[in-house]
Image: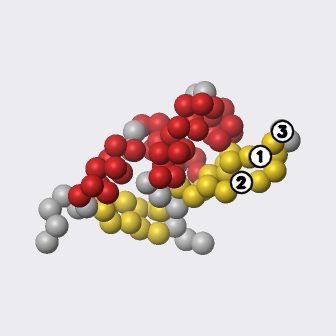
């Protein structure tokens, strides 16, 4: 499935802008290549799993990533994949 483009204005634009930090952008770049679990993302970015879980939750709430669950070695793995390839923030709607 090809990631889609989203166009946001107003409150939605503010939520997206708040979610886009340097860390979240790095997460988006990683999951644009392939689905990764939270532990792998944390390891690749050299950050804690707790912090990564919070970042993933925020990106999921803003619909920038899709999350699915699969059985893992020790419980359930939370897998992340890119949901959009382009975000357009409209400052002044027509």
- Residue drawn where x is 57% and y is 36% of the image: 52
Badge 3 marks a residue whose secondary structure is loop
Can you give x and y, in whole percent of width and height, for residue 86 in the image? 41, 62
Residue count near mark 1 (Cα–Cα under 10 Å), binned few <14, some 14–19, many ≥20: few
Question: Which residue lies under the disc numbered 1?
Answer: 76
Q: Residue at x 14, y 62 (%)?
A: 92
Q: Is residue 35 visible?
A: no
Which numbered disc flags the more N-terminal residue, 3 or 2? 2
Q: Which mark is residue 74?
A: 3
32 w.r.t. 58: above or below: below
Cβ–Cβ under 8 Å for marks 2 and 1? yes
Residue lying at 53% horizontally and 45% vertically, measured from the top left: 57
In the displayed structure, 73 sits above or below 64; it is above
Residue 88, numbered label: none
Residue topped by disc 2: 69
Q: Position of residue 7 (x, y in %)?
A: 33, 66
Distance (Cα) linking label 3 and label 1:
7 Å
| Residue 5 location (% of width, % of height) | 41, 68
The secondary structure type at the circle numbered 2 is: strand
Separation of disc 3 and disc 2 at Cα?
Answer: 13 Å
């Amino acid at each position: 499935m090809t990631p889609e483009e989203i166009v946001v204005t107003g409150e939605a634009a503010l939520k997206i802008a708040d979610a886009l930090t340097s860390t979240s952008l790095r997460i988006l770049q990683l999951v644009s290549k392939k689905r990764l679990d939270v532990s792998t993302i944390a390891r690749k970015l050299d950050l804690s799993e707790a912090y990564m879980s919070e970042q993933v939750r925020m990106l999921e709430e803003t619909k920038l990533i899709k999350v699915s669950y699969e059985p893992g070695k020790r419980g359930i793995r939370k897998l992340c994949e890119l949901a959009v390839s382009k975000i357009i923030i409209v400052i002044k709607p027509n």
